[in-house]
Image (cartoon, helix red, strand yellow):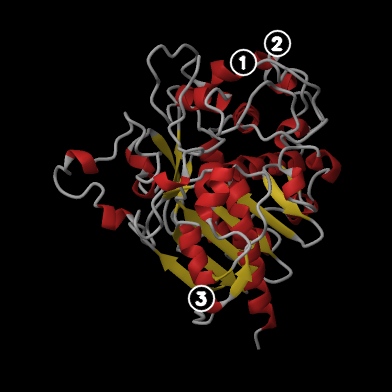
Amino acid sequence: MMVQPRVAAHAQPAAHLSAADSDPVKMGWMVGFPPPPDKRIRWADGSHFNPPSNRWGLSHFHQFLPHVSIRRGDGPVSELPRAERKDIDAVTFKIASPVDLSEAAKEAIALFGTTISWAQSLDANYTDSIVVLHRGRIVYERYRGVTRPETQHFLMSVTKSLPGLLAEILIDEGSMDEKAPVSRYLPELKNSGFGDATVRQVLDHVTGVKYSDAFDDPNADIWHYAQVIGVLPRQPGFAGPDNLYDYLASLKKEGEHGKAFGYKDVNTDVAGWLLKRITGQTCAELASERLWSKLGAERDAYWVVDSAGFEICGAGIGTTVRDLARWGETMRLGGRFNGQQIVSKAVVEKIFAGGDPDIFAKGHYGPGLPGWSYRSYFWVHPAEGVIMWKGLFGQGMYVNPRAEVVIARNCSHWNPSNSALDATSLPAYAAVVDHLTKAK
């Protein structure tokens, strides 16, 4: 069936308010008891996800969907020392030329090819919260709109990197064979498009499963998937599974595995199912045991689940921006943080080594990201020694060990695609790195 998207990724630029005009405080979303009808944000009409009300919704996503906790444990909070810099806002950079973007996106952002400051980039990317660490110290921290230090912002596809990391830990320990077919562990998927895919192919988004994540296509599978998992309300006449177990088993194969990079949310959900089958734990339990309880996190994180209690691994986690930065700092330090080796150095080095650059170059993102590759749901630039986590609407984390810099950021842009936002984000990060590393 045709599923009409709830995210206006291809609407005309005039329909989109600026960051200042769409500020959720200025808009008055959800103010009052009850809020006026035209200021209410609801799951039933998709307004929790749809711009401009996503600027409130992504900071309160846990109010709309069932979720479980990723527990922080009982230990003390790990302190992030502060050495704030007042000069970062004035750092300037030139926005990169757009690659593979719709004309609407080019016109709407209207900043491509110009020089702007770091402070201006916060508006350009509709930034909600951001933390910059240099040598483990907070040098920059901002909260805008309805976000505060305690806000658990929804991370979208940044989520993927957590099951990816957990999978690499199991592989390193010998609990999971990355060369094995998925069906060895999940016989339920034997007759699906995943049946003859290897664990490695699932982790690196190189499966030939028939599925499309194209947000600008109203017929793309992503819109059906969003209704299956419950992130968006089911449309009249919706026909299909109501949980990920059944949905994954229903997907078919349309190409050869291992030939080209193809970003598909469902690969990550297969990875989540593998984690549960192999460990006998839920993804949230495993994430708490192996990572979150060791970070000295300030708060529990949450993980959205479907109707069968399956943690949505393509996009389901919400956390504070500081705790996101703590995870990034752990990776920057080779897996060691908060006085302990949380992730083995071998796992971290494997991720930083990246995937096959030739396979990545054949995918949709390849031409726009020269030098990059992909490994276990991390975006990797081996030559620069950088890894990134990226999610819709501008969520992300940038980790550069050579420069000793970690940047954690949450946004609620009107355009979900990182193809559009990379043109501003990547040069902004590079400019701040250059500024921090050259500063005396």
Q: What is the CA distance from the residue labelled 2 to the residue labelled 3?
A: 54 Å
Q: Earlier in the sequence, mark 2 or mark 3?
A: 3
- Looking at the rendered structure, the secondary structure element under dot 3 is helix
Q: Is residue 440 above or below residue 277?
A: below
Extreme-bottom residue of the structure: 440
Image position of 16 (left or right of 33): right
Residue 2 image position (x, y, % from top left): 50, 18
Q: What secondary structure is found at the residue carrying circle 1?
A: helix
User: Which label sits on residue 249?
Assistant: 1
Seen from the viewer's position, the closer of residues 82 and 115 is 115
Q: Residue at x 33, y 33 (%)?
A: 43
Q: Residue at x 72, y 49 (%)?
A: 368
Give the residue type at disc 3.
Answer: Asp
Measure the alpha-carbon separation of dots 1 and 2.
8 Å
Across and down, in percent, residue 168 comes to 71, 42
Task: Examine the rendering and report whether any part of residue 79 can be seen.
Answer: no
Q: Which residue is mark 3?
A: 89
Image point 75% across, 24% down: which residue? 208
The residue that mark 2 highlights is: 191
Quick check: marks 1 and 2 in contact, CB under 8 Å? yes
Q: Position of residue 193 (x, y in %)?
A: 70, 17
Amino acid residing under circle 1: Ala
The kind of secondary structure element at disc 2 is loop
Q: Earlier in the sequence, mark 1 or mark 2?
A: 2
User: Type of residue at label 2?
Assistant: Asn
